[in-house]
Amino acid sequence: MNDCITLESYEEGAEIPAGTPVLFKMNEGVKKLEISAQDADLVKEPVAGTASDVNLVGSFTKIGGNDNQGLDKNDYIIGKDRFWRVSDLDDGNRVGIKPMRAYIRPATASQARAAMLSIGKGDGTTAIDNLNAISNDANAEYYDANGRRTNGLQKGLNIVKRGSKTYKIMVK
């Protein structure tokens, strides 16, 4: 199985430095996000990540688009409530993000091929989502641990054949 990309979370009410890219995941049924600041610093550029495995990279301006300048083929963006690898979208052509957005940039080749995203909260992992949109791939073949074909990802161990690659995915 490929490596797993992990993003660490902030606890609710935590102080986040100005310019730090942040990914918000709303709770079910919540439609409003309230953010407050006191004595906030103004920054001209987002804070650069320092993680050795993956960074959430923010941008105050548009990146990519018709000429796709700025996004690497191994970067991940969010669209339609899913994580997508740039190279999986139209072979990376015309892929971009709007201003005030962020993207995930893996630091290593194995991280770039990661099949899962782990979002950590405090002392442990709280969620694992599929980064390559395997769960939505109509051409993927899904099997349980006993080799029986299924209609999609199930709880437990899943074997997913997608093109010439096979993934082992654990769903809790």
Image (cartoon, grey):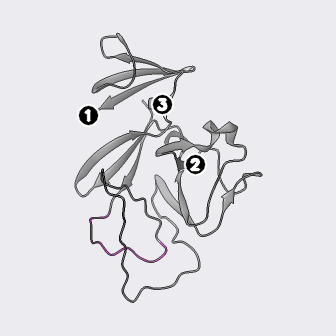
How far from the left and from the top, in percent, is residue 150? 37, 16
Q: Residues within 10 Å of mark 2 (few under 14, many from 20)?
A: many
Q: Residues within 10 Å of mark 1 (few under 14, many from 20)?
A: few
As drawn, 12 above or below 5:
below
Marks 1 and 2, the one that precedes in the sequence: 2
How far from the left and from the top, in percent, is residue 107? 53, 51
Q: Amino acid at mark 1?
A: Lys
Between the C-alphas of marks 3 and 2, the distance is: 19 Å
Q: Residue most toward the left?
A: 123
Q: Are marks 3 and 2 in contact (CB under 8 Å)?
A: no
Residue 75 badge: 2
Which mark lies nearer to you, 1 or 2? 1
How far from the left and from the top, in percent, is residue 128? 34, 41
Q: Secondary structure at mark 2?
A: loop
As drawn, 89 above or below 16:
above
As drawn, 40 above or below 76:
below
As drawn, 94 above or below 22:
above
How far from the left and from the top, in percent, is residue 84? 54, 42
Q: Residue at point 47% right, 53% down? A: 54
Query: In the figure, is residue 155 to the left or right of 57?
Result: left
The span shown in magenta is: 10-19
Q: Amino acid at mark 2?
A: Asp
Which image quarter is the N terminus in? top left
Marks 1 and 3, the one that precedes in the sequence: 3
Query: In the figure, is residue 39 to the left or right of 133?
Result: left
Residue 136 badge: 3
Q: Secondary structure at mark 3?
A: helix
Q: Residue at point 69% right, 55% down? A: 64
Which residue position holds label 1?
Answer: 172
